[in-house]
Image: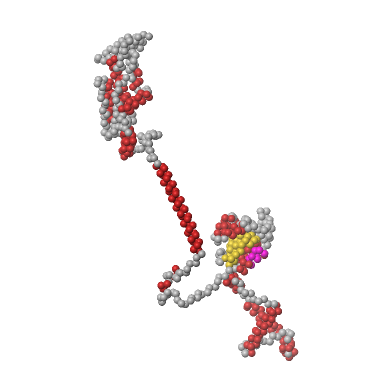
Amino acid sequence: MASTAGKRPLPPDDDEHDAHKRIRSNNGSPAPAPAAVNGVSDMERRKQEAAARMAAVKAKLAASRPNGAASPAQTRPAAAPADDIEAKKAAAAKKIAEMKARMAAQRQGATASPAPVSTPAPPPPSAPSEKDQRIAAARARAQQMAARLGTPTAAPSPPPRQDIGKQARGGLGIGLHPSLIGDMGSTATKGKGVQQGRANQQREHLPKINPYLAEGEDETKVEQEEGFDPTLGARRGERKSRQLGFHQKGKFIAQANALRQQARLEEMKRRIAAETRKTEIEEASDKAFLVPVPPEVEWWDEGLVDKIDTPDSIITALVQHPVILQAPQDKLQPAPKPLMLTPQEQKKLRRQRRKADMQEEQAKIRLGLVEPPPPKVKKSNMMRVFGEQAVKDPTAVEARVNREIAQRAFDHAKANADRQLTKEERAEKLKQQQAGDEAKGVRIAVFRVDNLSSGKHRYQIDVNAKQNALTGIVILHPQMNLIIVEGGVHSINAYKKLMLNRIKWSENTMPLTNSNAPSTFTGTNDGTKVGSGGEQNKASQWLNPMDERGNLKDLGENRCALVWEGEEPLRTFKKWGSRACETDGEARDVLTRSKMENMWTLARSMKLE
C-alpha cells in the first residue's frame, strides 16, 4: 500500500478553514472565485442569510413548544371581541393557556412568575461570530414581543451551539445549494431525528427535580388558582413510581395470634353461657315440684290492707250475693212435653172438664146471677115439651121449633166467626210465633243447586223464604247456585223439607206466557225476550228454561244438596235477596261482605253423589 505520511491533514470544520477549500463547479472543474461585494464574498453572504433564516425558524419552534413559551398565535395582538361573549371566551382561553404554561414550567423545574422575565443567554464564546449575534438579537426581539403581549412565562433558551449541519463535514469545500438551504429552514421537511436531538439537548441542560418533594406543593398551588381545570395537562396512562414499604418482622404473626386469642375467648363465652343455661333449666325443673308457701297478703290486696279498718272501707263483714243471671243456653232448651194419654183417658178428662163447667153454671143460676137458658126444643121432644099446645096447634108449634133451631145455628156460626182471627191478626200472630222461634236460637243452612233455569223452582225458593221470615242470599252462577238462609229453628226445618223433599228439581216448566211479567231473581223475565223494563239481565242467559233450539232444557241430572247447617249468635244478612255472578271471584267478593266466602269454596269442592 502507498504510504499516507505524505498526505496533508484535513482542516477542522470551521468557517476560517473552509475558506481555504477549493471550490469546484458542478461539472468537477474549478469554479471561478466569486467576486467580493463590499469586502464580503458571495459564499459568506449566503451563509449569513442561511443563519438568519435558521435563527427565525428556531425562535418559531421555541415559541410553539408547550414549555411555557408563548405560541405564535399569542405573539400577535388579539383582535378586540365583537361582544361580551367573545371577550369572555378570549379571557377564558388566555387563563387556560397561562395555567398550561405554569404547569408545564413547574414540571420542567422552571419557576412561574406573573411578570415576563427574559432568560439570560449563556456566556458567549471568546470570539462570537456574526451568526451568533444575529440569533441572540432575534431571541431578544421575540422575548420583548412576548412581554408586550403579557406572556406569563418565558421558556428557558437552550444553550447556543454552532450549526454545523448545513456545511459539509469533509471532502471538497463546496457549500450547500441555496435551494437546499431554504428547505432545511422549513419545518415541514425537518425530520423527526432533528427535533428529537434538540429536545434531548434541552433536557440535558434542565435542572433535575425530585418529583416526590415538589409535586404535592406545586399541584396544591395550581389547584388554588381561580379557574383550575384538573383535566387539563394530565397525562393518561402515566405510571407513577411508588416507594417500597416494608413490614416489620412478626407483624402478621402477631395479628394472627390476636385473632386466635379472640376466637378462644368467644368460644369460652359460648361454653359458659351454654352451661349456665343448662343449670338454670335444671333449677327451674326442680323448683316446679316445690309448692310455694302462700303469702300472708296477696299482691292484689296489698293496696287495700291499709283501708280495711276505715269506716269507708269497701271490705265489710257482709257477704254479697250477686244477682243470678240466666244462662244463655237455657233459652235454647225445649219445653218439657206433657204426659201422653190414650184416647179413653182423653175422653174421660173431657167429660170431667165439661161436668165441672156445668156445675159452675148451675150454681150461678141457683144464686140468681144469670138467667136460666131457654129450653132447647127439638122436633124429637116437641110434643113432650109443649103438650096440649102441640095438640091444639101443631103447625104453629112446629114453626116455632124450626125458628129456634135456625137461631141456635146462627148464634153458633156467629160465635165461631167472632173467634176467628182476621188477616192482619193472623199475620201478627205468625210474626210473633216466628220471633219466639228465633229467640230460641238462630239457625243457618246452606244449599247447593246445580241448575235454576226453571222459573217455578226460583219462585218456590223465593216465596217460601219470605213466608218463613228467612234472611239470606241466592248466588246465581252459570255452573252452580248457592242458597244461604238463616232464621228460627221451625222456619229452617220447614225450608229444609221444601228444598230436599217437596221441590222436584228434575222437572222443567215453560216460561210465563206474558213476556212483560218479571220472573224471580231476574231483571225482566226468564231471558227469552227483551221485556219492557229494559235490557236483559246478565243472569237471564243461563236462567233461560229454553235452549238455543227453542226446546226445554233437560234437568234430569239437576239436584239439591245441603252443604252445611249450624247455629249463629245473630243474623248475618239484613234481608232476603239474590245476586248474579259470572265468575267465582265475583261470587267470593259478594260473600266477603258477610264473611261467608268459605261457603262458596266448600260448595265448589263438594262432590254430589
Q: From this viewpoint, which residue is outermost toward the right?
A: 391
Which percent across, then down, holds residue 349?
67, 81
The quadrant in which residue 297 appears is bottom left
Image spot of residue 99 (x, y percent)? 32, 35
Asked whether the viewer can see residue 145, the reply is: no
Residue 313 in the image: state x and y as whole percent: 42, 75
Viewport quadrant of the N terminus: top left
Q: Nearer the viewer, residue 454 or 324?
A: 324
The one of 201 and 437 positioned closer to us in this rendering: 201
Inspect the magenta stretch and tell me whether residue 500 lies in it: yes
Question: In the rendered picture of this protein, how many numbered marks are placed on residues?
Answer: 0
**Foreground residue among 324 and 514:** 324
Name the residue: 32% across, 19% down: 164
Residue farthest along the top direction in this orientation: 2
Q: Is residue 244 left or right of residue 551?
A: left
From this view, report whether residue 300 is shown above or below residue 124: below
Q: Position of residue 10 (x, y in %)?
A: 32, 14
Residue 48 seen in the current view: yes
The residue positioned 56% from the left and 64% from the top of the image is 573
**Furthest residue toward bottom:** 388
Q: Quadrant of the C terminus?
A: bottom right
The residues colored magenta run 494-501
Where 332 falls versus 219 (above or below)? below
25, 458: nearer the viewer: 25
Q: Tell me the chief SS of the magenta region.
A: helix
Residue 342 lies in quadrant? bottom right
